[in-house]
Image (spheres, rainbow, N blue to C red):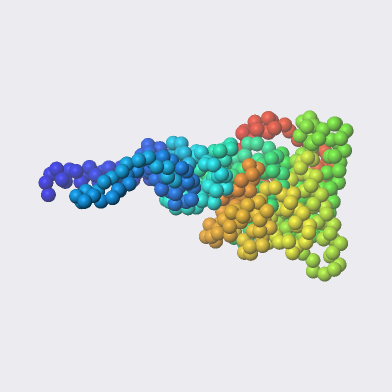
Amino acid sequence: MSDTTLLALGVLAASAAGLWAWRRWHYPSFWLVAAFPLVAISVRASWRKVALGCGLTKKRQRFWFTTVPGLVASTGVVRVRRKWQRIAVDTKPFMWLPKPTRYGWRVTLHTLEGQIPADYADAAERLAHSWGVHAIRVSSPRPGRVVLAATVRDPLVRVETLPASPELLKVTVGRLETGGPWIIDFRTVPHWLNAGATQSGKSNLANALVQGLAPQPVALVGFDLKGGVEFTPYSPRLSALGTTRAECVALLDDLVSLMTGRMAQCREAGARNIWQLSDDQRPVPVVVLVDELAELYLMADKSEKDEIAKTSTALLRVAQLGRAFGIYLFCCGQRIGSDLGPGVTALRAQCSGRICHRVNDPETATMTLGDLDPAALASARAIPAETPGVAIVASQDGQWYRARSYYVSEQAAELAASTYADRSPAWADVVAGNAAQVSDTDLAEFLNSIPDPREA
């Protein structure tokens, strides 16, 4: 083998090793500089075939210059007649240049006549397989335009640690499949329904909420129908905790009384909600964490019928009227079905935030996501058991996403609860309206100055 060949092989090997190291240690720059230009060229070059295979083309009449063979002359020469003919041609939607994103690329298309964004959403899986990407999501910023957002690799394989939450009643609990943060914002979406089987990540999400809300000036109330084993370790930060149905009924009565008092306060001040009150008059927000929601509705005998009816009515009143008066719900359950009674169905209608982890029965997934999008329901049923924390989230933007929560151990949540135990207002003061509230600006400055309990 000549020296030139050995040198060429050495250069190729060194280039391959350099590209591998570049991709391994700094994938963002590798994707933008080396990988994305090739992907963009491939996508544009294959768009006609891909659109035709996915059924996104339309037949249009076009004038085409064709050659039509004539009769064979006696000399054996074929006479060819050339003429313009009007024929049907498959027309693809116009595609703009793809633009890179952190985890893939996105491109804008002009829809053809008679097409709607749902046509592209139905073909999203076929488009993903045609281009060899992890997933494609479809959105429509305005009529006649469709944006295809491709994710080259799954951003939910690894998620980082839980970041701090510098805004009131807002917690970043994980990451969306788009690569963006998964934020639970009670100010925007006041009530949430969280369903998931054992070991699906449902309790981990509650841990993330406790850790994120612990430094904030809010009152946390726990309903733990599992005998208190879930929320008792967080009791230093909880203003109240109910571990039996009787205790939960008493807490619900307090919440209804609290809501009634805040109604009168807002009415006297001429405000529609507590956020229109001044900082010195605004009461402390209350976040209610409910674990094992089904236990509130299960009936062992007829003697519990009145108690269940009272519980259902009070919880529904809080869900219907609590948002304006600073009372927010986060309800968790392994199984949420219509067989639990009409109270669960009515409560679900008030919970605009939906989270569905892996579930054991399709009825729970249908109850959680069925009235939103059939595609979300199918995706929820496909969550594998070996990916705890992955869930389908229907949030404030009207769309649904695959998401994964950050891992927050029980020890980390307990540490946050004990570290910020002095910020837990007494339940008697909350009910009496004596717990003060700080402004959002003061809160942001305050949270930026406090130490992180995870670094303690």
Q: Is residue 291 left or right of residue 69?
A: right
Q: Residue at x 39, y 42 (%)?
A: 85
| Percent position of residue 229, x then y | 69, 59
Residue sitting at the far left: 2
Q: Nearer the viewer, residue 243 or 328?
A: 328
Q: Position of residue 259 (x, y in %)?
A: 83, 44
Tell me: residue 245, above or below residue 317: below
**Splitting the image into 4 quarters, where does residue 295 fall?**
bottom right
Left or right: 15 in relation to 142: left
Q: Nearer the viewer, residue 281 or 228?
A: 281
Q: Is residue 291 above or below residue 145?
A: below
What residue sits 42% from the left and 45% below the top?
87
Residue 316, x across and y down, in percent: 80, 52
Q: Residue at x 61, y 33 (%)?
A: 448
Residue 343 seen anywhere in this rendered image of the structure:
yes
Q: Does residue 304 lie above or below 431 as drawn?
A: below
Place of residue 132 in the rendered image (x, y in percent of width and height, measured from the top left): 42, 50
The quadrant in which residue 269 appears is top right
Left or right relative to 165: residue 317: right
- Judge left or right: residue 54 versus residue 420: left
- Pick the residue in front: 209 or 108: 108
